[in-house]
Amino acid sequence: MMQPRTVPFINYPQLFLEHAAEYTAILQEVLGRGAFILQRDVKEFETNLAEFLACKYAIGVGNATDGLTIALLATGIQPGDEVIFPSHTFVASASAIHFIHAIPVPVECGPDHLIDVDAVEKAITKKTKVILPVHLNGRVADMEGIEVLANRHNLRIVEDAAQALGAKYRGKCGGTFGTAAAFSFYPAKSLGCFGDGGAVVTNDAQIAERLFQLRDHGRNADGRVTMWGMNSRLDNLHAAILNYKLRRFPQEISRRREIAMLYHSFLSDLSSLLLPSPPNAEAERFDTFQNYEIEAEQRDALREYLQQHGVGTLIQWGGWPVHQFRELGFTQTLPRTDLLFTRCLMLPMNTLLTNEDVEYVAQMVRRFYQR
Ligand SMILES: *Cc1c(COP(=O)(O)O)cnc(C)c1O
């Protein structure tokens, strides 16, 4: 039996303190250059990110919610058009749809907690224009199924890849399947900065041109306004931090996959749990484990027990899938998602964890079910 210890869900100060000297040097250099808005660090990060994802264009934006908004706008979507998305997502996926006067249509997720392709098909109407899959927990949705539906019904795909930087399906990065996709660099995301940040990506030159203008007041390369635009630019300071972190990101992903493997080896024999598919279990997928989201019997009691023993856990979105926010006008009934939200729980998953931390968390989970 291991000694009691504290394993917070995430240790925010440590995200900075871990490499405080390097980050401070970057901040001083960039600030001393007076490079605040849309300077060379943003350009460099956009180039590096596009290269990392093997896509043509990346555009730094203020956050992924704005990224989804301008990605949807760039598709030419019109007021009243319907956009289908999974209810198991952050409300931001839906609010991006709402604020361009389109209609968010939430659907069920499948056993892997990602958008269910059959549910998407059932939700398609004459008004549907876009399918918006969410690559949750660092795992890419079933893009083959989504692409078949999009082609058959002449729909666009806009991907919410906020949680999936570097995750792959059949060798291709999540975020590079559709017309455009948004990534988030919120601090708790696997590639996080020290505030809000995001990016939109596309392989289409015309869409890219629109995205560059939409994030910067509708201005083109000559500074002339040729369309309505927003102010949503990735801070140059954050771009410099992200450039530094992107270089180390492949190791970050390997470590997350290692931790997932550890959890799997410690917990997979427990019949009270359903675990995510372990790394390397599926040849066509490369999951990056933004989160380690399990399903657990007696979820709330388990959570309480872990809390009492120093282990921080989280239920995604505060415990409510989007369709349960009736105040926003949703009327759908999604029993499978409702059931999932009585069972889902996220165990600590980040690169500040040691192997001993992971083993301790697993031991506490085992102890709860063996009482
Ligand atoms: C974090 C997140 C967002 C929002 O990202 P921001 O950068 O905070 O706007 C959107 N969708 C999902 C699935 C997320 O996890």
Image (cartoon, rainbow, N blue to C red):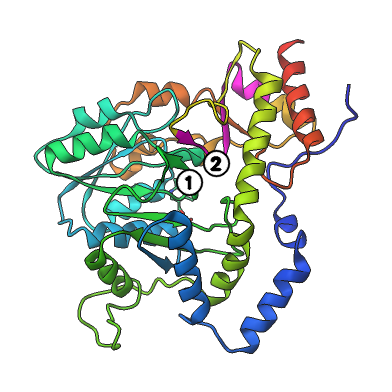
Query: Which quadrant, please, contains the C terminus?
Result: top right
Q: Which mark is residue 260?
A: none
Secondary structure of the residue carrying numbered label 1: loop
Secondary structure of the residue carrying numbered label 2: loop
Q: Earlier in the sequence, mark 2 or mark 1?
A: 1
* Residue 303 makes an appearance in the image: no
Tally of numbered tags: 2
Left or right: residue 102 compared with residue 158:
left
User: Circle 2: is it few (<14), some (14-19), or many (20+) Cα within 10 Å?
Assistant: many
What is the magenta range?
Answer: 285-302
Q: Amino acid at mark 1?
A: Ala
The residue tagged 2 is 288
Note whether 122 is above or below 244 in the view shown: above
The percent position of residue 336, horizontal first and vertical second, equals 38, 21
The stretch drawn in magenta includes residue 173: no
In front of the other: 248 or 263: 248
Residue at mark 2: C-beta within 8 A of ligand 1: no
Note whether 110 is above or below 315 in the view shown: above
Name the residue rendered at 28%, 88% in the picture.
Answer: 222
Name the residue rendered at 64%, 49% in the picture.
Answer: 252
Find the distance from the CA under tag 2 to the CA under tag 1. 7 Å
Quarter of the figure with residue 22: bottom right
User: Circle 1: is it few (<14), some (14-19), or many (20+) Cα within 10 Å?
Assistant: many
Query: Which quadrant, please, contains the N terminus?
Result: top right
Single out the residue that lies furthest toward the left: 126
Left or right: residue 335 compared with residue 35:
left
The residue tagged 1 is 164
- The answer to whether marks 2 and 1 mark residues whose Cβ atoms lie closer than 8 Å is yes
